[in-house]
Image (spheres, grey):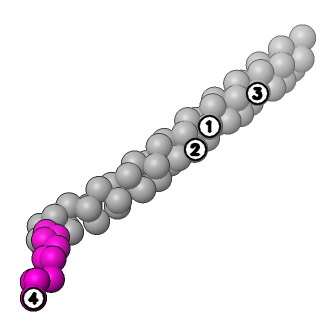
Amino acid sequence: MQAAPVRATAIPSVTDALRVVESLLMSSGQRTARRNAWTSVLDDRRRAKDRAEALRVLEEAMTTRTS
């Protein structure tokens, strides 16, 4: 009678499992951080455009008032 073949598979340790979970969460977190950063850039551009427009309107109002 022959012995059944033994399969040796390494059982992942708790540390290995935590590293996998951490890597998955970090990649998601990085995507979120990049998305938030880009949203901030777009908001800054919009505010700068609004400031420039407000300055133009104020300067125009001052020149028509003094003329």
Q: Give the amino acid at mark 4.
A: Met
Q: Residue furthest top?
A: 67
Quadrant of the image containing the N terminus: bottom left
What range of the chain is rendered magenta? Answer: 1-12
Q: Nearer the viewer, mark 1 or mark 4?
A: 4
Q: Give x and y (percent) for residue 53.
A: 76, 27
* Marks 3 and 4, the one that precedes in the sequence: 4
Q: Secondary structure at mark 3?
A: helix
Q: Residues within 10 Å of mark 3 (few under 14, many from 20)?
A: few
Distance in Å between CA atoms under marks 1 and 4: 74 Å
* Marks 2 and 4, the one that precedes in the sequence: 4
Give the image quarter of residue 18.
Answer: bottom left
Residue under circle 1? 42
Q: Residues within 10 Å of mark 4 (few under 14, many from 20)?
A: few
Residue under circle 2? 39
Which one is in front, 24 or 61?
A: 24
Is the C-beta separation of discs 2 and 1 under 8 Å?
yes
* 63 up-or-down from 34: above or below: above
Distance in Å between CA atoms under marks 3 and 4: 90 Å
Is the C-beta separation of discs 1 and 4 under 8 Å?
no
Q: Secondary structure at mark 2?
A: helix
Q: Which mark is residue 1?
A: 4
Q: Give the amino acid at mark 3.
A: Glu
Q: Give the amino acid at mark 2.
A: Thr
